[in-house]
């Protein structure tokens, strides 16, 4: 394989930014944990104990490697799942609690800020589109 | 404002359509003949048929700077477009079995794994998988 400019760059960036595989594994495990428990309360203390790292260190590492905080990642996962539930016809309040939000009002605010429409408007459009395609 | 269409410059639209549909698994969305050598030809991901369309754009044949830019990127091995996959090893194996050539083998790069292949239309394309 010829060493292209891009391959050289990959190796350079890998060496300067991603050379600590142990750190990377710690963050990957934290992310996997949140992915699998996004509907639960996020306890960074507990997570950092599991990863043998301090809460603030883990927070810094997560932000450094993913560009967002664990809390933001959890919210993304919750909103992503809420769209699937709404599309399947689950009521807005039920969806809110199912994905782990505590208040339908804050869920609606977050949803609207992220997707530009309320959960009920999203659901109406999704169901209308589905019935039109049948 | 929404992202509706993004372009990939290709040297031969028909060859590109075959590669992107038959090998990569995309589906044709719009195909309108504009001139003898120019079609408005878009494809979409099978997994997201209502998602962003990719225009297979014959600009390298009609605009010299586009041709020079595409050639320079290709020569340097730089991919300008990325596609997300669930299992990069499986996808690379599937594509290699179809004769697709890779310039970067599956490699871990921080929080992702990447691989780069030649789309036979003048471009390097990068596959990306989120590591777990």
Image (tube, coloured by chain):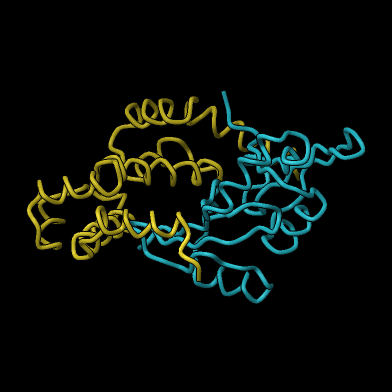
Chain colours: A yellow, B cyan
Residue A20 horizontal side relative to residue B51, left or right: left
- Image vertical order of residue A18 relative to residue A80, above or below: below
Would you identify the image quadrant in which residue B36 lies? top right
> Residue A23 in the image: x percent, y percent?
19, 60
Instruction: Pick the residue in front: B62 or A105.
Output: B62
User: What residue is rendered at 63% in x and 41% in y?
Assistant: B51
Q: How many marks?
A: 0
Instruction: Pick the residue in front: B6 or B99.
Output: B99
Instruction: Pick the residue in front: B117 or A63.
Output: B117
> Residue B60 in the image: x percent, y percent?
72, 41
> Residue B61 in the image: x percent, y percent?
77, 40
Please identify the residue farthest to the top as the structure is shown: B1
Would you identify the image quadrant in which residue B68 lies? top right
User: What residue is rendered at 50% in x and 67% in y?
Assistant: A2
Please identify the residue farthest to the right as the structure is shown: B36
- Image vertical order of residue A87 relative to residue B20, above or below: above
Residue B16 horizontal side relative to residue B1, left or right: right
């Amino acid at each position: 394989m010829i060493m292209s400019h891009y391959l050289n760059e990959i190796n350079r960036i890998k060496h300067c930014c991603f050379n600590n595989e142990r750190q990377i594994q710690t963050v990957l495990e934290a992310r996997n944990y949140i992915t699998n428990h996004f509907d639960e309360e996020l306890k960074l203390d507990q997570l950092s104990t599991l990863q043998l790292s301090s809460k603030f260190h883990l927070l810094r590492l997560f932000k450094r490697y993913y560009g967002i905080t664990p809390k933001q990642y959890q919210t993304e996962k919750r909103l992503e799942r809420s769209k699937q539930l709404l599309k399947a016809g689950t009521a807005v309040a039920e969806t809110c609690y199912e994905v782990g939000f505590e208040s339908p009002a804050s869920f609606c605010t977050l949803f609207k800020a992220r997707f530009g429409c309320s959960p009920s408007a999203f659901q109406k459009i999704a169901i209308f589109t589905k019935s039109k395609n049948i | 404002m929404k992202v509706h269409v993004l372009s990939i410059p290709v040297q031969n639209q028909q060859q590109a359509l075959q590669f992107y549909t038959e090998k990569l698994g995309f589906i044709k969305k719009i195909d309108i003949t504009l001139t003898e050598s120019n079609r408005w030809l878009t494809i979409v991901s099978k997994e997201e048929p209502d998602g962003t369309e990719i225009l297979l754009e014959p600009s390298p044949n009609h605009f010299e700077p586009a041709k020079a830019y595409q050639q320079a990127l290709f020569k340097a091995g730089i991919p300008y477009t990325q596609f997300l996959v669930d299992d990069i090893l499986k996808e690379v194996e599937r594509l290699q079995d179809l004769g697709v050539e890779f310039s970067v083998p599956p490699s871990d790069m921080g929080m992702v794994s990447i691989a780069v292949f030649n789309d036979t239309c003048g471009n390097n394309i990068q596959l990306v998988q989120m590591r777990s």
